[in-house]
């Protein structure tokens, strides 16, 4: 029988897997979990002093930004450590690649592979992280007026990413993801020209660095980023993980990118989830499988924090059952 790891690799490579890859194992809804996944996550250890405690609404991360939350673990950055570019040369990033933080990686990766899972890690983002470090208003201005300083910061992040990838590669990890939203509901954060000038070269560098080591690049991206999609393809992005696929349109994504990039989606968390329309959830889940699968090329990733988007147990169950029903490709004929 084909392992989860083999299925995921075939999905990413458009190599006719028997079914979609999937990851349903997310935070519980009122204590209920759907504990099923083809994936196994590994990553550097984070000091407990930087982790928010239960009930804590404000905390400072190891990057130095202060975060505030209402009902999500991630929270929102409300105070930035690099408001002044004069602080850049003295700013110390957390060394996520330090040996002491990663001594467990090989053992954990071997454990994941023994379970038959596709093992992946994470690396810092190149838009969301600078936004947190600079503050969003400063960051928007940086793209126009402070490109030299912004590029220096991005190169610092890129160097850290390379060192983290080296650790993952030594441990035998299969791929990495970056959680890097790049747009609003109506368009990308920066113009396509700015993206091509500033971000695309560094995006390409990371992907080339991974591919040279036989690893995949997976990109979580919220926002309507139609104008960047061709550049994602140009750079060689293997997987795009969308929580809001209807922002760009499932039909549009199918017509333009099915078979060119592997999608790793949930049912749309803005348009469809949280409205208690179980039929709409079932229809969209089936549509995504029908439209986005091409020789593989489609996987499911349930939204990690379902209660934060008012997702009910019934909605999650319908999403789960529908993707499982139609996710076996022999049933698509």
Image (cartoon, helix red, strand yellow):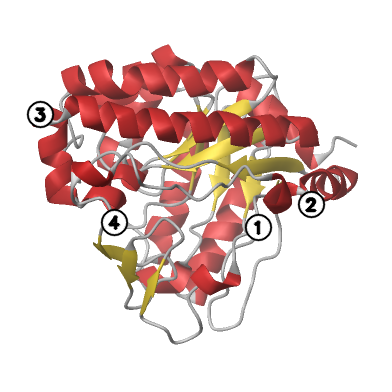
Q: Which residue is mark 1?
A: 45
Residue 52, placed above or below residue 140: below
Tell me which corner region of the image, top left, top right, bottom left or bottom right, holds residue 280.
bottom left
Q: Earlier in the sequence, mark 2 or mark 3?
A: 2
Residue at position x 15%, y 26% from top? 191
Q: CA distance from mark 3 to mark 1?
A: 36 Å
Q: Which residue is mark 2?
A: 104
Q: Earlier in the sequence, mark 3 or mark 1?
A: 1
Q: Position of residue 304 (x, y in %)?
A: 51, 61
Q: Which residue is mark 4?
A: 81
Tell me which corner region of the image, top left, top right, bottom left or bottom right, holds residue 49.
bottom right
- 163 relative to 88 in the view: left or right: right
Residue at position x 48%, y 58% from top? 303
Q: Which mark is on residue 178?
A: none
Q: CA distance from mark 2 to mark 1?
A: 9 Å
Residue 171, placed above or below residue 129: above
Q: Position of residue 258 (x, y in %)?
A: 46, 22
């Amino acid at each position: 029988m084909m392992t989860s790891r083999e299925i995921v690799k075939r999905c990413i490579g458009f190599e006719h897997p028997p079914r979609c890859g999937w990851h349903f194992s997310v935070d519980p809804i009122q204590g209920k979990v759907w504990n099923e996944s083809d994936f196994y996550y590994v990553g550097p250890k984070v000091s407990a002093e930087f982790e928010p405690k239960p009930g804590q609404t404000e905390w400072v991360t190891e990057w130095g930004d202060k975060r505030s939350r209402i009902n999500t673990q991630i929270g929102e950055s409300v105070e930035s450590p690099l408001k002044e570019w004069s602080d850049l040369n003295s700013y110390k990033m957390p060394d996520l690649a330090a040996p002491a933080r990663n001594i467990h990686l090989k053992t954990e990766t071997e454990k994941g592979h023994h379970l038959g899972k596709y093992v992946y890690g994470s690396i810092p983002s190149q838009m969301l992280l600078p936004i947190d470090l600079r503050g969003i208003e400063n960051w928007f201005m940086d793209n126009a007026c402070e490109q030299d300083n912004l590029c220096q910061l991005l190169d610092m992040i890129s160097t850290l990413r390379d060192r983290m990838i080296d650790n993952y590669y030594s441990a035998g990890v299969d791929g990495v993801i970056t959680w890097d939203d790049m747009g609003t509901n109506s368009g990308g954060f920066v113009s396509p020209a700015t993206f091509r000038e500033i971000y695309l070269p560094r995006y390409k560098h990371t992907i080339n660095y991974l591919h040279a080591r036989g690893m995949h690049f997976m990109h979580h991206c919220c926002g309507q980023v139609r104008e960047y999609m061709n550049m994602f393809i140009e750079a060689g992005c293997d997987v795009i993980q969308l929580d809001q696929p209807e922002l760009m349109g499932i039909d549009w994504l199918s017509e333009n990118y099915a078979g060119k990039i592997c999608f790793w989606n949930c049912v749309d968390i803005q348009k469809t989830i949280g409205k208690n329309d179980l039929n709409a959830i079932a229809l969209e889940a089936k549509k995504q499988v029908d439209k986005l699968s091409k020789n593989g090329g489609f996987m499911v990733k349930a939204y990690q924090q379902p209660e934060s988007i008012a997702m009910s147990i019934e909605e999650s169950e319908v999403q789960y059952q529908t993707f499982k029903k139609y996710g076996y490709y022999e049933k698509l004929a």
